[in-house]
Amino acid sequence: MHIIKKLLIGSPVFLLFSFFIAETAIAADSIKPSIDTIGLSIAVIVAAIATIITFFTLGGIKYVTPENVLNTEVRKSLYNYIDERPGSHLREIARELDLKPSNAAWHLRKLEQTNLVRSRTIGGKRVYYLVEGGVDARREAIAEAVLRNKNARDIMLYLQGNPGKHLLEIANALDLNHHTVKWHIKKMYLAELIDGDTSNSAYPVYYPTDIGIQAVSNFSHHLKKLGKAA
């Protein structure tokens, strides 16, 4: 398969040089051959041969495929990090793995192009998760991305212990600005971490979903593990 790819790519190069050589030969036939013309033809032929040899000996263009994408240490590290921390955003990943953001972004694109990783923008940040886990991995990634904010975690924990509270009650209980609570409530609602009862449109109340309860439990457990490791 690799030989076929090389031939497919190398053939246009070879044909281009062959065409150039033929044109040179025709031009040479139409005039009296000279040492300069002969020398030019030899130089072109040598250059063509050298180009083709270099192409094949150096392996040609390297294709990134699902089979070889993890052959580099940096992409393997990125994949493993996202596996352990779904929902991580670019700058966090780059910081934790000691990579330049531009370098991390380039390799992450390769992981996305080979359908090993997917990304989604949450709260203005692009977060990543593995394709392998399907819908569950996506949901977990989004939940973790939302719950990384302390205010969001506090709101979730408060609703877990006090379901059915409206926005102002949550804001007063946690001593937060009601606009801040509203912003986090919107994100958590979209992430299916909470549900709402809007029968009283003036004061809709909110409840944690099973997904939300599980997500905040998982995240709290993860934070404890990080604390012990530190």
Image: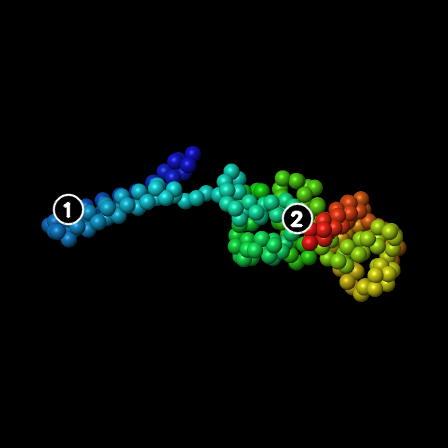
Image quadrant in which the N terminus is located: top left
Which residue position holds label 1? Answer: 29
Front one among 85 and 222:
222
Residue 96 image offset from top left, x and y in percent: 61, 54
Q: Residues within 10 Å of mark 2 (few under 14, many from 20)?
A: some
Q: Earlier in the sequence, mark 2 or mark 1?
A: 1
View extreme (top): residue: 1
Residue at point 38%, 39% (across, down): 6
Look at the picture and state if 138 lies above or below 98.
Answer: above
Residue 48 image offset from top left, x and y in percent: 27, 45
Disc nearest the viewer among 2 and 1: 2
Residue 67 image offset from top left, x and y in percent: 51, 38
The image shows a total of numbered marks equal to 2
Residue at point 85%, 59% (across, down): 170
Give the number of the disc on residue 160. Answer: none
Which corner quadrant of the image does residue 150 belong to? bottom right
Which colour scheme appears in the figure? rainbow
Disc 1 marks a residue whose amino acid type is Asp
Look at the picture and state if 67 lies above or below 217.
Answer: above
Residue 20 at least partly seen? no
Give the number of the disc on residue 85. Answer: 2
Disc 2 marks a residue whose amino acid type is Arg
Residue at point 68%, 41% (across, down): 135
Look at the picture and state if 185 lies above or below 177.
Answer: above
Q: For the residues marked 2 and 1, what is the alpha-carbon distance in whole angstroms? A: 69 Å
Residue at point 86%, 57% (across, down): 166
Give SS at disc 2.
Answer: loop
Q: Residues within 10 Å of mark 1 (few under 14, many from 20)?
A: few
Give SS at disc 1.
Answer: helix
Front one among 133 and 121:
133
Residue 139 at least partly seen? yes
Front one among 32 and 5:
5
